[in-house]
Amino acid sequence: MTSQHPARRRRTGRAVAATTAALAALAATTLIGSVPAATADEAPLVESGVTDWQYLEDGSDPAAGQDDRTAWTTGALPAGDWKTGAGSFGAKNGAAIGMGGGLVVDTLLDQYLEDGTDVPTYFFRTSFEADATDLAAWKSLTAEVVYDDALVVYVNGQRVAGFEDSAVTENVQYAGDNGSDPDHSTFSVDASVLHEGTNDVAVALYQGRSNSSDVYFDMESLTPVDAATPAQISDVVMTIGADESSRNIAWYSDSAADEVAQVVPAAQLVDGAFPASGATEVVSTSGTATDGQQYHHATLAGLAPSTEYAYRVGSDADGWSTVTRFRTGDGDGDYSFVFIGDAQIGASGNVASDTQGWVDTLDAAEQAFPGSEMVFSAGDQVNTASNEAQYEGFLSPAQLQRIPLVTNIGNHDVASLAYEQHFALPNVTTEYGKPDATRAGGDYWFTYGDTLYISFNSNDMDDAGHAEFARKVIEEHGDEARWKVVTFHHSVYSVASHSSDSDIVTRRAELPPAMSELDVDLVLMGHDHVYVRSHLMSGTTPVGTDEPVSEDVTPSGDEVLYVTANSSSGSKYYDIKDTVFDFSAVQNQEYTPNFTNVEVTGDTIAMTTYRSDDLSVVDTVTLHKPAGETDPTDPGTDPTDPTEPGTDPTDPTEPGTDPTEPSTPGTDPTDPSTPGSDPTAPADDAPAAADLSTLTEATHTLRVNAVDTEAGTVTVTVPRELAGTPFDWFVHSDPEYLGDAPTDDDGVLTLRLPVELEDGTHTLVAQRADGSVATWATFAFVTDPVTGDPTGELAFTGAEVLPLAAGSALALLAGLGIALAARRRRA
C-alpha cells in the first residue's frame, strides 16, 4: 500500500523571496565566480571587443603531423586559414543573432563544415607583452570567460584552465556539455607561467555535438593581480571529519604560497579577532585546481564536545579569510542533521535563481532546527561538473562554513576533479568508487555519535566493489556503531523519470541484497528529484505492502528503509510516473523545495520532511531499533496497534493514511490524471539519440560478445582506448536510452535491454556526452517464433563480423527513417 499525502496546489515555479535588486546582486557574485581581485589601476591584457585574436574555423588541426598536439599554442602561428577578429565570437544556427543568456556576437563564426555538420573545434591565438618590471609587480592573472560548449586555455604552451573538457583527447573532436546557454566562468594564471617579452594565449573551443545549435567564446578580460594584493580566498567550506571530534576545511586561493588553517576556542578571540599567539595551526595539503587557482584541505582534529571554536584560513604573508565560529555537538550520542536532495545549481539555466532557492532552504532549515550538526547532501551539488560559478552558488550559504557538510558525488559532479578539490572528505578510498583518474570519486566513511556512515560513488557501477568496501568498513568499525547508514546518489527506489533507467534497474537488483546482508538500517539517496519513502525492504522484496502505511517502522531481520530526497533548490523536478511501484510507501511531488530533519538517538532515527517555503510537513517516519531481534510489545513500534496515533487507516482524522481517500493530482502513480504520468512519454532526463544515418565505418568498432535473450542483456567490448569512459547507450530501431554506464578497465560492459525489445537485428550505439557517436555495432535478438522463448541463437557482430558491407549496412539503417528522440535535460 502506498500513502499519498494530500497535495497542495501545483507550483510552476519557486517563489523567490529576494527583491529584484537583491537577486541582481546575487547574480553578480555567483555568475562571476571566485575572481581574484585585480589591482584597480591595472589595465586588462586581453579585453573583449578590444583585443584582436587570430582564429581558425575550418575544422583543420593546427598541429597536424606533429607529435605534440599542443604545439600550436605557442610560438609562430601554424600554417592555415587563420582569420582576425575581436571577441565575442559565436553563431546561433549559422547567424549572429538569437544567442541565449542575453549575449551578443561581435564576430560571426562559420558554424558548419561542407557536409552540414558543426565545426568540431575552433582555435584562437593572441598575445601580450610583459617586461621585468611587470613580472615583478604581478603575482597572477585573473580571467573571465564565457563559452559554449567546452574550453581549454593555454598560456605560453602550458594548459592553465579547462572547462567541460574531461573527454578531450584530440584537437579536432566534439566535446562538452550541451547546456541551453553559454556558461560563465573564471580562472587564474600564476605569474610563474609568464616570461619577459611576448606571452602567447591560446584557446581551443569545442562544439558539443555535430548538430549543436550554437557556439560561443568570449574572454571578457585577462587582468594582472598586483603582487601586493592580499590573497583572494574563496569557496571556504567545512566538511565532515572522520568522527565528531574533527572537521575538515577546504578553500580556494589565488596565491601559490603555502597556507594554513588556524583554530582556537572562541573564548580566546580578542574583540572578534584571532589572538597574537596560542592558535592551533594546521598546514594544508594543496594543489592546482581545475580553474588554475590553488585548492587547500586541512583537518581540525581533537575538538572537544559542547565547545564553540573559531577558525580562519590563509597566511600572515598573503592575508586571512574572515573569522568563522562553529560549535561542536554534545557528544552524548543523540544529534540531528538536515538531509537534502539535489541542489544542482545551474540546472534551471539561472544560477542566481537556483542559488537563492538553495539559500532559502538552508535558512529555513536552520531557523527551524538551529541545533543541526550536519548538512547531508544526496549529490548533484552543481549542474556542470567544472563550472565554478555554479560551485560559488552552492557554497554561498553561510551555514556551510560552520555546519559540517556531508556530500555524495552525483552524476553531474563526477566529470571534473573540481568536486574532490572543493570538498575535503574523510577516509576516501581510491580502491573502490574511483574508476579513473580524470573523474572525481572514491567511496568513503565516517562515524558520528553511535552511527557509522558509508558513502558510495554510485557513478561507478561496480556494485560488488561498493559492497566489498562496506563489508570491510563494517568488519572494522561496525561493532562501534548502534546504527549503520549507507548513502549514495542514484536512488534505487524512486518513482520518477530515472526509476526505469537501465542503470538504475541494475543497481536496484544488486545493491539492496548487499544492504540487507550487511544489516544496514537506512539508505539515503537522491537523483530523481522526487520524494520517496520505501516500505521496509528485505533485499529487493517490500515488506508489509498489504498493511496501512505507518509513521513508525521497526525492521525485522534484514529489513532496510530507503529514503529519496526531492530537490532542495527548486532547480529541477521530475513528474511521478504512472506506474505502481510496490516498493513505495510514500511518494510526493509538489514542485517545491524540500528538506528533511533527521533526529538520531540510540533507539530511533526520526525523519520529518518539510516544504522549505512554509515548513508544512510532507512526510514523517520514525525508524525504531528492535529490542533484540523483534519485540512486538515495544510501545510505539507496532503498526497494527489501533491505539497508536497515525497508524489507523480508518481514522478520518489521519490525513494521507486512508487508502479510500481520493487521490490527489501529482501524487498517485495509478491516477491517469496525474500530470506527466504518461508511461509512453520519453524520460525527461534522456539525451538525444544520434541519427543512424550519421554512423560511419570509422566508429564501427564495438564488439558484441554475447546476447542473453532470456536475461535480456547484451555484453559488449569497446576499443581499449575507450575503456572506462562513460557513454550514453542507445538501442535502435526505435531508439531507447539504456543509461550512461562506463565499461570496466578491459572495456567490457553488460547492458540490460528493454523488456519489450522485438525480435530482429538491432543497432547498439555508444554516444559521448556531446551526442557524437563513439562506437557502434549491430546484433540479433531472436526468440522462438511460436513460443516466444529464447532460442539460444546468438549473433556476435563487430567490425570484423558485420554481415553486410559497411556501405550497404549504413544505407539500410538510414533507410529506416528513424527519428531523433527529443532531447531532454539529464539529471
Image (cartoon, rainbow, N blue to C red):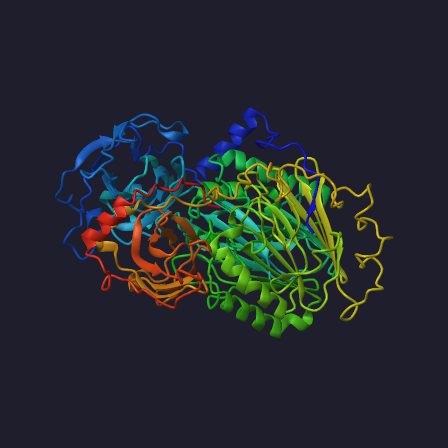
Residue most extreme to the bottom: 475
The spot of residue 689 in percent (x, y) is: 36, 46
- Asked if residue 771 shows in the view, the reply is yes
The spot of residue 800 in percent (x, y) is: 22, 64
- Label count reads 0
The spot of residue 682 in percent (x, y) is: 46, 43
In the displayed structure, does residue 150 sit left or right of residue 556?
left
In the displayed structure, does residue 64 sit left or right of residue 101?
left
Residue nearest the viewer, comparing 687 with 165: 687
In the displayed structure, does residue 724 sit left or right of residue 595?
left
Residue nearest the viewer, comparing 673 with 454: 673
The spot of residue 471 in percent (x, y) is: 58, 71
In the displayed structure, does residue 534 sit left or right of residue 388?
right
Seen at 52% across and 40% down, the residue is 393
Seen at 56% across and 28% down, the residue is 22
Residue most extreme to the right: 643
Quarter location, residue 240: bottom right
- Asked if residue 155 shows in the view, the reply is no
